Amino acid sequence: MLAAVKWEKSAQTIIFKLHSRGGLVSLAVLLAVALSGCGDKPAPQAAAAAPPVTVAVPTKRTVTDWDEFTGRFEAVEEVQVRARVGGFVTNVEFKDGDMVRAGDLLYIIDPRPFEAVATQADGQLADARAKAELAKRDLDRGLTLVETSAVSEQVVDQRRQALQAAHAAETVAEGALKAAQLNIEFSHVLAPISGRVSRHLVSVGNLVQGSDSGSTLLTSIVSLDPIYVYFDMDEATYVRNNRLYFAGKRPSSRETPNPVQVTLVGETKPSHDGKVDFLDNRLDLSTGTLRGRAVIPNKDLSILPGQFGRVRLIGSSPYEALLLPDSAVATDQSRKIVFVVKDDDTVEARAVTLGPLDDGLRVIREGLKPDDRVIVDGIQRARVGAKVSPHAAQAAPAGSKT
């Protein structure tokens, strides 16, 4: 009873002091303050649920490693069309940038001067033949007369020498005529190969020089189908491939037309296939690389000489491999890891050795087993040693093959 009276007086004193300071506090707040030392404990919070993640087992399939290089396309055949005779251009017979066939007429150089020379040479040949015929008749008569001693042997020898000289003059005249006829032929400039012609560099009315005095460049032609792609292989790749060859794990490109795949600028995957047809006989001393070449079919003529492309060259024989989406691989300082869900649904970080990408999936060389459950979605929610709620992927990872 006495304790209750003392508590009531204490409460009144507190209320009086609060009012004296201008504070207005409800009786409920005062009771809470008075009872704050009673030692009541708050209710415990519910345990957090295991975060959901998507898991998948590695895809198993036969893959082939590829080495990738930067390549440049070049024409299999390329010709600079030059004038072989001098004269004035009278006709340009092609459209700039058009496709031409071997033998198509490109330019006409005024042929009249060469035709005149040919006519003159033809007359000289006729004269030489007539003289040769006369010399032959004189010799035949001399051979008949020498039998009756009507002429001396010396006369016969002179007539025989005259016939030989006439035949020589005939041969010279024939050569002059052929040269004149060739000049007439060269006045019509023909395409030496089939391909795409460049622009015309000489217009009608201009004087061009022939091969005797520094021939004039008229245009150029490049072939397009097939087309070469040249690439440079670094020394380390060459040594590795050489070791694989001697171990019987990879055919040599010198002996076998190994396949290549080419990705053009702006493409995300290879669009053209070809085969290696040449490896140089030495490494370039300035770059330490080995020059290689592949032949690429170009039926649609879409690839032009001078273009760049990424060249993939076969780097191994086919082998069985485990693959994962590249997004399932994380980096832990200097090593690559994947998160594996164990049988008790706890997360384990597994160090792996990576291989190349194959059709959108990353080859895992070491660190995984075929039945491992790997987190492929929700890596950010996983903690090593903590439980997760795994859910199997609904479909095979992108890029997988059946």
Image (tube, rainbow, N blue to C red):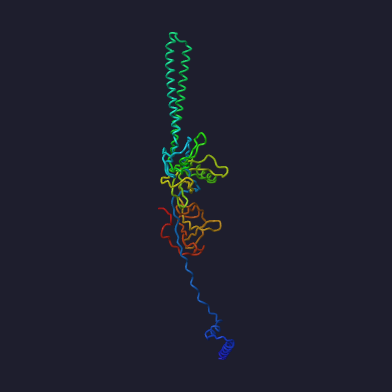
User: Residue 49, image x and y in percent?
Assistant: 47, 68
User: Residue 359, image x and y in percent?
Assistant: 45, 52
The image quadrant that residue 371 belongs to is: bottom left
Q: Which residue corresponds to the image point at 48% horizontal and 59% vertical from the top-left? A: 340
Say above or below: 384 vs 120. Answer: below
Query: From this viewpoint, is residue 241 visible?
Result: yes
Residue at the far left in the pictured view = 402
User: Residue 373, image x and y in percent?
Assistant: 46, 59
Query: From this viewpoint, is residue 294 visible?
Result: no
Exactly how many numbered labels are in the figure?
0
User: Residue 155, image x and y in percent?
Assistant: 47, 13
Give 228 or 163, whichever is nearer the viewer. 163
Residue at the far top in the pictured view = 148
Give 362 or 274, whichever is nearer the viewer. 274
Q: Which residue corresponds to the image point at 43% horizontal and 51% vertical from the top-left? A: 61
Q: Quadrant of the N terminus?
A: bottom right
Give 63 or 349, whichever is nearer the viewer. 63
Say above or below: 1 vs 262. Answer: below
